[in-house]
Image (cartoon, rainbow, N blue to C red):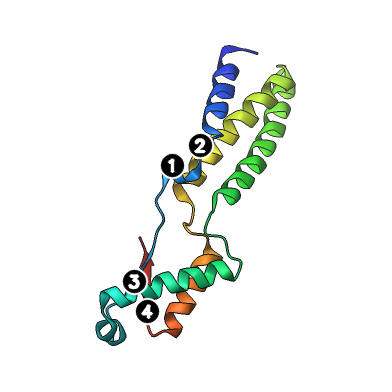
Amino acid sequence: MNRITKVFVCLLILLSPLPISAFESTKRPILYPNAHFEIMGSEKAQADIDDCWLIAQKAGASEDSSAQVSEEAAADAAALAAAGAAASAVLGGDPGRGAVAGAVGGGVASMTAGMMAQDNPPRVFRRIVERCLFEKGYEVVGWE
């Protein structure tokens, strides 16, 4: 294993146990201040958000998107391992080393990009919360 491959392997080992929560905080719905919101007030609106959050959990939707990021990283690593092996074979290098470098580099890049760009919470969870809030009379304009 050359020095670059060892560095990639070390990075993958160091990053893999980090929980996704170390890179994010849970986003919450932002409500439009419509007439219903004004009547209910901010405190009641926050209680209603919490209630809808529990409804989404009880419906079986997961608010944790770390599994999705891990699956995408594994798929990207496998694809890049094959590409690395093929490129090394064509260019006269060691296909095994190319596969390892491609897999490690792709996995680390995919995990990092996924952690930074993921929907938090996942889309299905958000849709349940938004629908619940809509049925209570609120309008969700975004998540922060």
Residue 66 visible in the picture: yes
Question: Which label lies toward us, 4 or 3?
Answer: 3
Question: Which label lies toward us, 1 or 3?
Answer: 3
Question: Which label lies toward us, 2 or 3?
Answer: 3
The structure residue drawn at horizontal position 43% and vertical position 81%, both measured from the top left corner, is 134
Q: CA distance from mark 4 to mark 2?
A: 35 Å
Q: Residues within 10 Å of mark 1 (few under 14, many from 20)?
A: few
Q: Which mark is residue 18?
A: 2
Which residue does the numbered mark 3 point to in the structure image?
Answer: 46
60 up-or-down from 23: above or below: below
Q: Is residue 89 left or right of residue 32?
A: right
Q: As shown in the figure, which amino acid type bears the numbered disc 2?
A: Leu
Question: Which label lies toward us, 1 or 4?
Answer: 1
Which residue does the numbered mark 1 point to in the structure image?
Answer: 22
SS class, disc 1:
helix
Q: As shown in the figure, which amino acid type bears the numbered disc 4?
A: Glu
The structure residue drawn at horizontal position 57% and vertical position 12%, both measured from the top left corner, is 3
Q: CA distance from mark 1 to mark 4?
A: 30 Å
Q: CA distance from mark 1 to mark 3?
A: 25 Å
| Labelled pair 4, 2 in contact (Cβ < 8 Å) | no
Q: CA distance from mark 4 to mark 3?
A: 13 Å
Q: CA distance from mark 2 to mark 3?
A: 31 Å
Q: Residues within 10 Å of mark 2 (few under 14, many from 20)?
A: few
Which residue does the numbered mark 4 point to in the structure image?
Answer: 139
In terms of depth relative to the viewer, which is nearer, 87 or 64?
64
Q: As shown in the figure, which amino acid type bears the numbered disc 1?
A: Ala
Q: Position of residue 77 (x, y in %)?
A: 64, 36
Image quadrant where residue 76 sits: top right
SS class, disc 3:
helix
Residue 127 visible in the picture: no
Q: Position of residue 86 (x, y in %)?
A: 73, 29
